[in-house]
Amino acid sequence: MSLFITLEGPEGGGKTSQAAHLAEHLRRLGHDVLLTREPGGTPISEQVRRVLTAMDNTAMRPETEFLLFSASRAQHVRELILPHLQRSGVVVCDRFYDASLAYQGYGHGLDLDALRAITTFATGGLTPDLTFLLDLPVEDGLRRREVDGNWNRLDAYDLDFHRRVRQGYLELARAEPRRWVVLDASRAPEVVQDEIRRRVVERLGK
Ligand code: TMP
């Protein structure tokens, strides 16, 4: 059975390690798992990621940013995600188009209807089956990012931007409660992982 799982949230919520632990767990259960991330996943998409996150690209406009994320996504979906789902695999993806709605839409204030239309073109209409929102206060998340040394150009946007991103995510989750699971990511990582596993296994059993 194919299943497309995404992990989302503001900075520092532990998405990357939660995604890795989930993938490992599902492989142990015998599933064919693709663990991937956005922006990135394919060589072309990883090149676009470098342009997006480079600290010296301070002149980048929100529209450019969104289109680059979308370009990276169009490649990622067609080269990696769709073929894996078509082979009945499970895809675990660290961020997907909801990040563009939250960051470029709610964060930068770009028109959400326009973003959705371009997103549908970029993804060919592919939607995750299950999306986890690893939610935590933005100050806590950004502090974690500074400590882990993964600081990038987007982390450096001001605190109000990150607050709008978090509120945006919560609104997206409220609008589609059947797809989203909102988790308090300020708890211990093992507790969060247990809950993620439980929800995924429940979903695979259906
Ligand atoms: P990461 O921190 O999850 O590796 O993601 C890199 C940065 O890119 C992070 O600040 C979130 C941001 N981002 C967007 O702004 N829009 C998007 O569509 C995606 C996928 C990520």
Image (cartoon, rainbow, N blue to C red):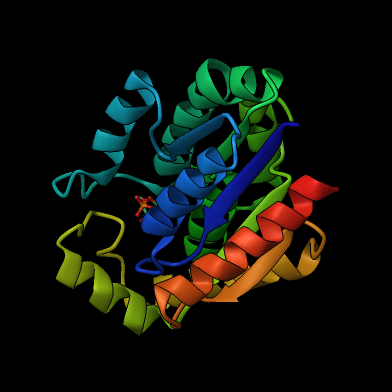
Q: Relative to residue 37, is residue 18 depicted above or below?
A: below
Where, quadrant-wise, is the N terminus in this rendering?
A: top right
User: Which residue occupies 16% across, 72% down?
Assistant: 147
Q: Find the residue positioned furthest to the right.
A: 206
Seen in the picture, residue 162 relative to 51 is either above or below; the reply is below
Residue 86 horizontal side relative to residue 36, left or right: right
Residue 15 percent across, percent down from the top left: 43, 59
On the picture, is 140 further left or further right than 122? left
Percent x, y of residue 157: 30, 66
Name the residue nearer the viewer: 154 or 196. Answer: 196
Residue drawn at point x = 43 percent, y = 40 percent? 37
**Residue 136 shows up from this direction:** yes
Across and down, in percent, residue 35 comes to 46, 37
Give me the residue at 35% from left, 68% from top: 12
Q: Nearer the viewer, residue 38 or 69?
A: 38
Q: On screen, 88 above or below 174?
A: above
Q: Residue at x 61, y 17 (%)?
A: 83
Q: Position of residue 93 (x, y in %)?
A: 51, 42
* Residue 135 seen from this side: no
